[in-house]
Amino acid sequence: MNLRHWIPSTQQMSNAIQLRSEPFGQITMRQAFGMILVAGVLGGILPFLVSWIQAATLDTVLPLAQAVRDLEQIANITGLGMTWPAPINLQVLTESVQTLAGLPQPLPGWMAALLSALGAWISLPLGWMQLWLAYGVLVALSAKSLGATMTLQRFFAATGYFVVPLVLTNLTVIPFIGGLIGGVIGLWAAVVYAKGVQVIGRLDGLRVIASLLLPIIVVVIAYVLFFFSTGLMAGILLG
C-alpha cells in the first residue's frame, strides 16, 4: 500500500500552511482523511502524557482530575478578589469532587488514569474529523449559494489542510502561555481553512468570510430559538 494514497507529501502540507494555492487542488479526500487522523495522533502526544500524569497523581480518571484542577484554579482566582458568578458554594463543590476522585475503583489508579487519558487522545482526531465534516457541509452549502464552483469531495479535500497547524497542539501544555499558543494555532488553522475555501471555490475574500460565518450565525440563532422556546414551554407548563 502506497502511503501517498492516504496522506499528502510533507512538501504539499508545508506549502498549504504557507497559504500557497497549488496544494489545495492536488489533494484527494482520502488523503485529507488520513492526514487528519495522523495529525490528531501526533498533536495529542504531549497532552496525553500530561493528562495521564495529572490523573495518576490523584489516582483517578481524567475527567475528575480535570474537574479538581479547574476548581482549584477558580479558587485561586476568587482568592485574588474576583467573584464566583455562579450561585454555588465553590468550597463545597470542590470538596465533593475531591471526594469523588478519592473513592475506591475497580482498577488501580494509574491504570484508570491511563485508560481515560488514552480515550481522550483517541477522541482528538475523531473530534477534528467530526468538525471537518459537520461544519464543512454547512460551509460548502454557503459557498455554493454565493457562487462557488466545486464538488463536495474536492471541497473537503482542500479544506482538510486546516489540521496541519493543529499538530502544534502539543505546545498548549506549556504552563501560563499554553492558552495563548492554542489561540494562535486555532487562528492559523482557520486561515488555512479559509484559503482552501477560496482556492477550491474560486471565491473572493468577502464571500469566503461570509461562507465561514453564515453557518456559525445560523447555528447560534437556532440554539437561541431552541432555548427560548424550551424555556417558554416550560414556563407555560409550570404556570
Image (cartoon, grey):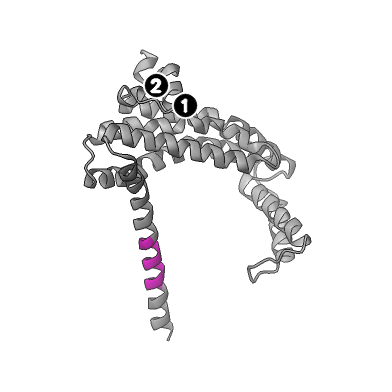
Q: Is residue 205 magenta?
A: no
Of residues 172 and 55, the one nearer the viewer is 172
- Mark 2 element type: loop
Whether residue 24 is visible to the viewer of this picture, yes or no, is: yes
Looking at the magenta stretch, what is its main secondary structure? helix
Q: Is residue 225 magenta?
A: yes
Q: Nearer the viewer, residue 60 or 216?
A: 216
Do callouts 2 and 1 mark residues in contact (Cβ within 8 Å)?
Answer: yes
Taking the image as shown, residue 21 lies to the left or right of residue 54, namely left
Query: Which residue in the protein does label 2 denote?
Result: 7
* Residue positioned 55% across, 36% down in the render: 121
Taking the spot 33% from the left edge, 36% from the top edge, the residue there is 197
Relative to 64, 152 lies left or right: left
Above or below, 68 relative to 116: below
Disc 1 crowd rating (10 Å Cα; few below 14, some 14-19, many 20+) is some
What residue is pinned by disc 1? 38
Badge 1 element: helix
